[in-house]
């Protein structure tokens, strides 16, 4: 049986979509009986110092032949190391979480030198093919089944609860969400921002300051990074999830929301629209006109019980047809063992 060695960056320390994907893929591959070793490399990725790239080159060697799956954050700056491994007959696959821009010739050449590309979203795969890169395979994220059953009904006196899961980062645009909430203070609701406050401390501080400035400290909580039962408890409270990032290659949290039977609002024009799919479990909103569009949508959802129930039912139906991580692992195995 082929052995797989995953080479992953260790310099992204918050709970990111890429880190979660990498960990769940390794676990799912092992669940299918594949021998998987994981090598995590610290370094200034994606640029990487000479020492960083030397350690990467060493990780691409071993006494026994193996299939190497390298995170794109490392691979994009390591052309010489991938070329040397390929020349030695090693199979080096690059796991791409973000679309290649085509503006960095080193990145493009490094991806071309690889055995093939595993893309975690259709936009990423399309961008790779547009650059003329070959052996491109799609391996969209799976979902985990919730550890707790969703309540069949909520406390009639509880206000509707919004959730936004993701590190507090400018791209995620939590400030826009907070400002939209400030415009609907006349309605009943609560909200939670669930994600790392350490990935960008200055932005996290700005989010907290905006909550205080708008007088929302009793209605909007910043929980910090959560996982396991603490995160499950947040999902069980939520009735509407939002992912309004300026850019997303896919948006794993959208599928996580749907797996919990929670509808989602995403930003139109991002890869999160692919994750939302055609289930009818939410909406892709055009935010080019600014905050007013988000305010209008939130008011509409809060004020229309039929809309809320329709989205909820669609999310519940979607939860039973989403791909599992085992499905993702099978797609990856089909690709890397066929080449």
Image (spheres, helix red, strand yellow):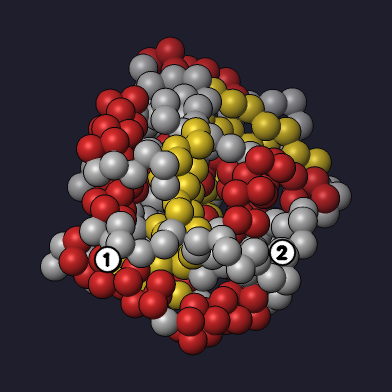
Image point 26% across, 72% down: which residue? 296
In the picture as drawn, the residue positioned furthest to the top comes out as 51
Image point 50% across, 20% down: which residue? 42
Quickly name the residue at label 2.
Answer: 150
Q: Can I make out residue 124 in this image?
A: no
In the picture as drawn, the residue positioned furthest to the left comes out as 289
The relative height of residue 300 versus residue 338 in the rendered view (above or below) is: below
Q: Quadrant of the C terminus?
A: bottom right
In space, the residues marked 2 and 1 are separated at their CA atoms by: 27 Å
Per the rendering, the mark at residue 233 is none
Q: Residues within 10 Å of mark 2 (few under 14, many from 20)?
A: some
Circle nearer the N terminus (2, 1): 2
Image point 30% across, 62% down: which residue? 186
Quarter of image, res 154:
bottom right
Per the rendering, the mark at residue 294 is 1
Image point 57% across, 76% down: which residue? 312
Q: How many numbered discs sit on the rendered protein? A: 2
Q: Is residue 323 left or right of residue 48?
A: right
- How far across and down, in percent of the image, does residue 96 sit? 46, 50
Q: Can I make out residue 301 in this image?
A: yes
Q: Are marks 2 and 1 in contact (CB under 8 Å)?
A: no
Q: Is residue 150 left or right of residue 293?
A: right
**Mark 2 falls on what kind of element?**
loop
- How far across and down, in percent of the image, does residue 261 sit? 62, 69
- How far across and down, in percent of the image, does residue 254 sit? 50, 62
- How far across and down, in percent of the image, does residue 47 sit? 33, 27
The relative height of residue 338 versus residue 179 in the rendered view (above or below) is: below
Q: Residues within 10 Å of mark 1 (few under 14, many from 20)?
A: many
Q: Is residue 94 left or right of residue 207?
A: right
**Mark 1 falls on what kind of element?**
helix
Q: Is residue 286 left or right of residue 115?
A: left
């Amino acid at each position: 049986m082929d052995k797989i060695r995953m080479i992953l960056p260790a310099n992204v320390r918050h709970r990111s979509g890429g880190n979660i994907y990498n960990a769940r893929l390794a676990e799912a591959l092992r669940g299918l009986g594949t021998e998987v070793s994981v090598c995590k490399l610290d370094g200034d990725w994606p640029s990487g110092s000479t020492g960083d790239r030397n350690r990467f080159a060493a990780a691409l060697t071993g006494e026994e032949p193996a299939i190497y799956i390298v995170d794109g954050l490392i691979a994009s700056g390591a052309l010489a190391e991938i070329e040397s491994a390929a020349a030695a007959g090693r199979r080096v696959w690059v796991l791409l979480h973000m679309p290649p821009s085509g503006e960095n010739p080193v990145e493009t050449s490094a991806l071309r030198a690889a055995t093939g590309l595993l893309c975690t979203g259709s936009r990423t795969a399309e961008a790779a093919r547009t650059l003329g890169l070959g052996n491109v395979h799609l391996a969209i994220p799976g979902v985990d089944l919730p550890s707790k059953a969703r309540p069949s009904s909520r406390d009639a006196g509880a206000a509707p609860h919004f959730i936004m899961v993701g590190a507090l980062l400018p791209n995620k645009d939590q400030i826009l969400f907070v400002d939209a909430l400030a415009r609907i203070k006349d309605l009943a609701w609560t909200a939670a921002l669930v994600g790392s406050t350490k990935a960008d401390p200055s932005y996290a501080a700005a989010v907290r300051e905006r909550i205080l400035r708008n007088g929302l400290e009793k209605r909007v909580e910043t929980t910090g990074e959560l996982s396991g039962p603490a995160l499950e408890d947040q999902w069980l409270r939520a009735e509407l999830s939002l992912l309004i990032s300026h850019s997303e290659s896919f948006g794993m949290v959208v599928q996580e929301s749907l797996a919990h039977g929670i509808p989602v609002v995403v930003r139109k024009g991002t890869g999160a629209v692919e994750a939302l799919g055609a289930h009818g479990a939410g909406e892709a909103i055009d935010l080019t006109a600014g905050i007013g569009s988000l305010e209008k949508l939130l008011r509409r959802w809060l004020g229309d019980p039929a809309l809320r129930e329709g989205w909820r039912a669609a999310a519940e139906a979607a939860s039973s047809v989403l791909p599992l991580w085992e499905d993702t692992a099978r797609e990856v195995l089909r690709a890397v063992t066929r080449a």
